[in-house]
Amino acid sequence: GQQVMQIPQYQHVQEGEDFTTYCNSSTTLSNIQWYKQRPGGHPVFLIQLVKSGEVKKQKRLTFQFGEAKKNSSLHITATQTTDVGTYFCAGPDGGTASKLTFGTGTRLQVTL
Amino acid sequence: DSGVTQTPKHLITATGQRVTLRCSPRSGDLSVYWYQQSLDQGLQFLIHYYNGEERAKGNILERFSAQQFPDLHSELNLSSLELGDSALYFCASSGGQGALWNEQFFGPGTRLTVL
């Protein structure tokens, strides 16, 4: 079945440093979603990318969908302690959002 | 607050027992999804219901079953519980038929501990 891997598994940065997580799918994706889960919380939708090569920005967060639509990245500029959490990418399995395969997640820790 | 509610928040039970987890989707959402989150397995899709009908199944064990009722709330039944079933169970909802571009709204989860 479809597999979605993320690297790194864990990253610890100092506040103000940049952070990037990479997402790779074993199959071509029709779209990719990103979610954030705070410690002790539930996943919260951040964004969806649809087009090949698409780049979207949300304040300090930049999301990119690869040209082959098999990979994606999330870059955070100048991290803050509020960015702490686990970031998941997720892609529809078989082209329908009925079955969403979540990536393995990247846990971000930010210290002062 | 996502608008999705789940009960109970915590559940502690013994091996071999049966439990029922309940989920109420956001108002107007017809789709309900169930996920299992454990430390070593990440966030695993279990099952998707749309307007009362099963639409997709993940790697859901035969000991697990779910249904969605006419009022759109959903229940996940876990039976013959094993230690390995201890996990956080999330319900999520979305509008439409689970078509493309539907973000999912997650509930706060039910933490199940099997002793």
Image: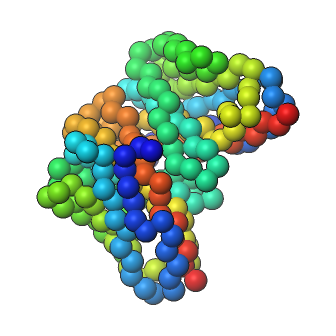
| Horizontal side, residue A86 vs residue B77: left or right | right
Q: Name which residue lies at 57% across and 60% down.
A: B38
Q: Residue at x 43, y 68 (%)?
A: B8
Looking at the picture, does residue B14 appear above or below residue B92? below
Q: Position of residue B23 (x, y in %)?
A: 34, 59
B71 or B50: nearer the viewer: B71
**Could you say which quadrant of the image residue B52 lies in?**
bottom left
Residue at the (51%, 86%) spot, across then down: B14
x and y percent of residue A88 in the render? 56, 38
The residue most toward the left is: B70
In terms of depth relative to the viewer, which is nearer, B26 or A4? B26
**Residue placed at 46% from the left, 80% from the top?**
B81
Total number of numbered discs in the rendering? 0
**Image coords of residue B114 (percent x, y):** 54, 79
> For the C terminus of chain A, which image quadrant?
top right
Scheme of image coloration: rainbow
Q: Is residue A43 above or below residue A74?
A: below
Q: Position of residue B78 (x, y in %)?
A: 38, 74
Compared across the picture, whether B13 is left or right of B97 comes to right
Any part of residue A37 in sight: yes
The image quarter containing residue A77 is top right
Q: Is residue A14 above or below residue B29?
A: above
Residue closer to the observer: A31 or A35: A35
Lateral position of residue B50 relative to residue A20, left or right? left
Residue A28 visible (yes or no):
no
